[in-house]
Image (cartoon, rainbow, N blue to C red):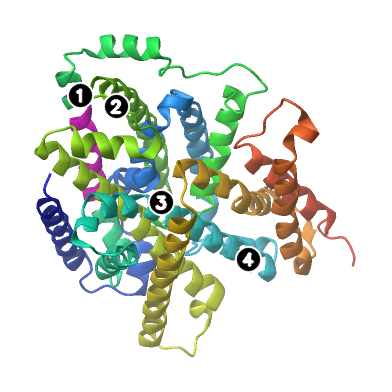
Amino acid sequence: MSPILLFSFVIIYFLLLLTVAWYTGKNSNNDSFFIGNRNSNWMLVAFGMIGTSLSGVTFVSVPGAVAKESFSYFQITIGYLIGYILIAFVLLPLYYRLNLTSIYNYLSSRLGFVSYKTGASFFILSRTLGATARLYLVVNILQDTILESFHIPFWLTTLIILAMILLYTYEGGVKTIVWTDTLQTTCMLAGLVICVFYILNQMHLGFGESLQLMQQKGYSKIFYTSPDSKLYFIKQILAGAFITITMTGMDQEMMQKNISVKTLKDSQKNVVTLGIILMVVILLFLFLGGLLYLYADTQNVKIIGDQLFPAIALHHMPSLVSIIFIIALISALFPSADGAITALTSSFCIDIIGIQRKSDLQDEQKKKIRQRTHLVFAFIFLIFVMVYKWVDNKSMIGVILKVASYTYGPLLGLFTFGILTKRIVNDKWVPLVCLLAPVLCLFIDMNQRLLFGSFEIGLELLIINGLLTFFGLLFISKPYGAKS
């Protein structure tokens, strides 16, 4: 497939995004940027958030992991739905009652100003590491398949893509992203469905026949019943629930879209709908993964992991399917990066700088601060993507979930402590507790065999991290109303 032809479709797609951004970003202000003027349509938000939740990592890593882990990822997805239900009926009512722009303001009112800054700082670290890992994966594929032939260096490819993202998010922020995410999710899901039907047609297989072949190859196993395994179904379901609670419910990027919906009831419908749709979509991605490995056998392709889907789509399918794959891939790329940069800008401006608390600043001054912060985060993204390129990894979804176990654990502990107890913490010691918990988790993770023998800790490390934070906060707290 000609790289020039593929690149032209990338440009056409980007021009379409710019058109949507221009239309939705007209007459935007800081409220539009941060929370979409609290006027977003819940159905658009729910559909668009599918793309944000999945990203390019799901698009290539989930199918690629089928050879090693079969359909076990679906166990995590069951936990996702449980997590979304808890977000809808526990966290969202809290956020709407307090009329929050940044969800970390809850920590300020409940635990203290230092706790608030600590929570926001952990979000900024978490989202930066996770979003840049997602961005790296897709940029690397685009580099290998298109831009390498133009002799464009990797750093310049990353810079160009970040510049594209800045162009359509610079003014409208969340107001624009709600619409662009909808477009991108549509393209990504269309690409998924087309690839599934193409392979089934090429191999002259029905749905049932393909599942039988996958079962024979060991690709379709969902539930793992050995308690020692890191894929044990109870571990995976629990981990999935807590990953969703933290990476969605306690994440400014995800929640700023939800709280941009006009009413709490509509926002709850959005979250529950998203959880149900995601189960179906991820199951389809896993099914595609099984099909890709079956098709790879017929084409004598020996690649496994993240590179399988790109290799099959670009070198063993017709040009039209290759074009659809590239459009679907960049549709998976943009939602995971545009929303992250916007949310990081929002959190840094509101939580760290505190521009909403500074009454001496005019709206135009606040806007300039916000725009400069937006540019700085784009530069930070460039640096982190280059770091990921340097270390490289065969399966980025594993890296992202592992990073989340360390960085979202303190947020889980902070919010849980605030919601479940009425105790008052010694605010100045909160940062120390939130730093010690991940350090202890690292020690546990590195010494698993020594500590637990054959028992493996997987993604439930996030829960352990949250518990350590919770008990640390308990240690530095006193009952409500107690004398100093």
Real-space CA distance between mark 3 and mark 1, rounded to the nearest whole angstrom: 26 Å
Furthest toward the right, the residue is 483
Which numbered disc, 3 or 2, marks the residue that appears first in the sequence? Answer: 3
Real-space CA distance between mark 4 and mark 2, rounded to the nearest whole angstrom: 46 Å
Name the amino acid, label 3: Arg
Label 4 environment density (alpha carbons within 10 Å; few <14, some 14–19, many ≥20): many
Which numbered disc, 4 or 3, marks the residue that appears first in the sequence? Answer: 4
In the image, taking residue 118 as reference, residue 24 lies left or right, namely left
Q: Quadrant of residue 118?
A: bottom right
Query: Was residue 136 drawn as part of the magenta stretch in this picture?
Result: no
Magenta span of residues: 182-197
Name the amino acid, label 4: Tyr
In the image, taking residue 184 as reference, residue 407 lies left or right, namely right
Q: With respect to residue 158, does 379 lie above or below?
A: below
Which numbered disc, 4 or 2, marks the residue that appears first in the sequence? Answer: 4
Q: Quadrant of residue 236?
A: top right
In the image, taking residue 89 as reference, residue 265 lies left or right, namely left
Residue 239 place in picture, x, y as percent? 58, 35
Name the amino acid, label 1: Ile
> On the image, numbered disc 1 is attached to which residue?
199
Which numbered disc, 1 or 2, marks the residue that appears first in the sequence? Answer: 1
- Name the mark on residue 134: 3
- Name the mark on residue 116: 4
